[in-house]
Image (tube, grey):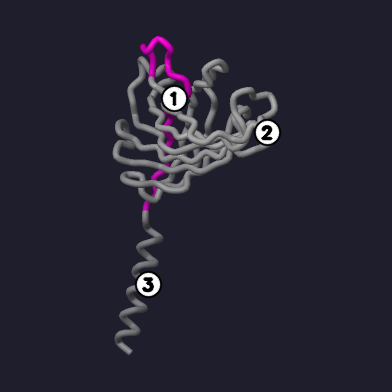
Amino acid sequence: MPLLLQLALAVAVAVAMAGTATTTTTHTRFYMHDTVTASASGGGPAATAVRVVRGAAAAALPGDAVNRFGDLYAIDDPLTDGADAASSAAVGRARGFYMFASRTDSALLFSATMEFTAGVHRGGAVSVLARDAILDEVRELPVVGGAGVLRGAAGYGLLRTHSFNATTNNAVLQIDLYLSV
């Protein structure tokens, strides 16, 4: 019987401690630079998004002469604190992939881990997994987990296209993360 009482007491203490844990809510804004086509002069950034799987020719997307349903891109995109990569401080990298996952519209399956190497979240990372309807003004990215100083993070990101070059397919994306840690 004393063992049962000890177990009950341990459970009660654990439940009480879980109820007193503090949660911090934070917002951070950064920019992701997705470079599909490197500068022809060699003076610009190297490609950070590379198509690794090509969709079938019969799977052309409406209004898109470049991409097809099933195209898969691996990414290693820089994250900066401003929209201009040349004059902004690096804060991390987004590594993962996106795939054209709709036959009828410009929508991606986007999966990436955003690792922070500078700033307030240095040493932390969050992972996102979402449908990204790239022509929508604002898209939501659910945060599915965190690591390092962001371990156990929950929340979401709001993604906006800051700029897009239709000739090169290069884009700068503004991401606002809202996290509870």
Toward which corner of the image does residue 91 lie, by quadrant? top left
Q: Which residue is mark 2?
A: 58
Query: In the figure, 130 relative to 175: above or below?
Result: below
Q: Which residues are magenta?
A: 22-45
Please say if the residues under marks 2 and 1 sit with CB atoms less than 8 Å apart. no
| First reached walking from the N terminus: tag 1 or tag 3 | 3
Q: Mark 1: which secondary structure?
A: strand
Classify mark 1: residues with Cα within 10 Å, few (<14), some (14-19) or many (20+): many
Q: CA distance from mark 1 to mark 3?
A: 49 Å
In the rendered structure, which disc, 3 or 2, sits on the residue that comes first in sequence?
3
Disc assigned to residue 33: 1
Which badge, 2 or 1, comes first in the chain's sequence?
A: 1
Residue at image location 49% in from the left, 41% down from the top = 111
Q: Amino acid at mark 1?
A: His
User: In this orientation, which residue lies closer to the viewer: 89 or 42?
Assistant: 42
**What label sits on residue 141 in the rendered view?**
none
Dot 3, crowdedness within 10 Å: few (<14), some or many (≥20)?
A: few
Q: Is residue 34 magenta?
A: yes
- Name the foreground residue: 63 vs 165: 63
